[in-house]
Amino acid sequence: MNKKYDAIIIGAGVIGCPISYELAKNGYKTLTVDKLADAGMGSTAASCAIVRAHYSTVDGVAMAYEGFKYWLDWENYLGNVKDEKGLARFMNTGSILLKSQGHDWRKVKSNYDVVGVDYEEWSVERIKEAVPVYDLHEFWPVRRPEDPKFFDPPTRMLEGAIFCPEGGYMSDPALSAHNIMRAAEAHGSEFLFNVEVVAVRDDGNRVTGITLKDGTQFDAPVVVNVAGPHSYKINQMAKGVWDGCNIKTKALRHEVMHVPSPEGYNYLEDGYHTSDGDVGCYYRPEVGNMFLIGSEDPKCDPQEWVDPDEFYAGKGGQGRDNQLTEAQYKAQSYRCARRVPDMQIPNQPRGVVDLYDCSDDWIPIYDKTDLPGFYLAIGSSGNQYKNAPVAGVLMAELIDKCEKGLDHDKEPLQFKLRHIGRTIDAGFFSRKREINYNSSFSVNG
Ligand SMILES: Cc1cc2nc3c(=O)[nH]c(=O)nc-3n(C[C@H](O)[C@H](O)[C@H](O)COP(=O)(O)OP(=O)(O)OC[C@H]3O[C@@H](n4cnc5c(N)ncnc54)[C@H](O)[C@@H]3O)c2cc1C
């Protein structure tokens, strides 16, 4: 006899864990399975875990702003559960969005006004006061260091910034997923690690369960694909699901650099998360007084789409292929060093490499599928860490309503963001949507 659950969640990352947590709180008996050894060990472990509200769409801003409220009140969100590994911490640095040609900040500002995000307008002088190491000249357009114009002296100044005081980052993304797992377990959720799903079963009408590589079967009337960069592989296992998605997902390799802060400047204590479309980077403080530098996907950079199995197996099967490339290390750190001219860039690159589970329009899919009982929380596109607790609530509600008869494709769930009091049309995240051209088609969502 196969063991039976009300819902099986495939993937114990920062998005899978809150779905388990919220379903368990709603009385579902859940099993979450993951092929890695613990919660948050997949792409979540490499996340920059930045929590900021600037998105290109009103709904994107609303989801993210709702997310702030969970990170700011982490212990309560977890139901004050204990975790033997300790709790992750929200580093509330505030978030600077530089006004630049590389970022449609006017759209962001108008979205902030619609949603009611708390923000301030900062002049160049005000930014300089907050972060004295920044050179606030305009360096646009974003170039690669091999471009002969890369080091051209700038002639103009930036306009200023939009500052969002509630922004920041989580101290340890893998730990944050682990914390949520412990909170879910306190409500009866079960987690099983080092097991790989190789089949999604159905009875011709609806999903019936999963099969693991060792042949073990678990049954459930609800199965949720939260497999991160492997999401498209899981979709291909479930009958009709891949073909029924108008928006597809695939895995994109991404590099993040750690470069020491200029001497004498305590970036770790005094720094701010900054989005800098002018040089195509975002950066935030990192342990060791480092600048953690991510890419905002400027057009001049090549995109590297990969097979997640090959990436995670690594070269010669030695584990995750996490070698920074010299060219991208140079590109991101030299760009950041235009803004922070006293930054010393070591020859030896340091940082992390991982995969985005990228959707066609860089907006996630939170949805049901054409296979009844099979649901998707995928396509997080490098920008959904901050939304994970909200995604948990959204998915639990969506699943419950659909299982009770809602036809979400015809009458999309109207989802109330309980902290900011705004209702969004969850059809925004539909797998059936046309590509959303309001998106930035970048990590900015
Ligand atoms: C480098 C990088 C930087 C980022 N920075 C930010 C940021 O600053 N802010 C932000 O908001 N977002 C950021 N993101 C995005 C964010 O981290 C992700 O959206 C989020 O971590 C995805 O979580 P997940 O649970 O969907 O996926 P994952 O954490 O990848 O979890 C999926 C899990 O599924 C498991 N799995 C897959 N296939 C199977 C199978 N067949 N059987 C069993 N288990 C399986 C995997 O082992 C994995 O643990 C970043 C992402 C990356 C890669």
Image (cartoon, rainbow, N blue to C red):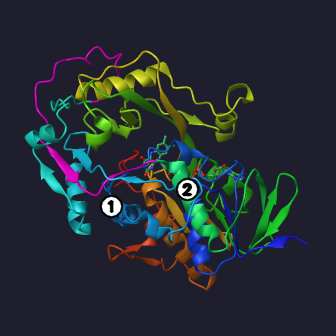
Element on which disc 1 rests: helix
Q: Amino acid at mark 1?
A: Val
Residue 394 magenta-drawn?
no
What residue is shown at x 60% (from left), y 74% (from top)? Answer: 23
Q: Position of residue 211 (x, y in %)?
A: 82, 60
* Residue on which the image places disc 2: 177
Ligand 1 neighbours mark 2 (CB distance < 8 Å): yes
Q: Is residue 77 left or right of residue 194?
A: left
Q: Amino acid at mark 2?
A: Ala
Q: Position of residue 14 (x, y in %)?
A: 54, 56
State which quadrant residue 166 falls in: bottom left
What residue is shown at x 28% (from left), y 39% (from top)? Answer: 277
Q: Is residue 290 left or right of residue 229?
A: left
What residue is shown at x 37% (from left), y 61% (from top)? Answer: 64
Residue 161 magenta-drawn?
yes
Identify which residue, 50 or 376, lies in the foreground.
Answer: 50
Start and end of the magenta stretch?
142-171
* Residue on which the image places disc 1: 61
Crowding near the residue tagged with mark 2, few <14, some 14–19, many ≥20 C-alpha atoms within 10 Å? many
Identify which residue, 165 or 306, lies in the foreground.
Answer: 165
What residue is shown at x 43% (from left), y 66% (from top)? Answer: 428
Q: Decide which of tag 2 and tag 1 comes sooner along the chain.
A: 1
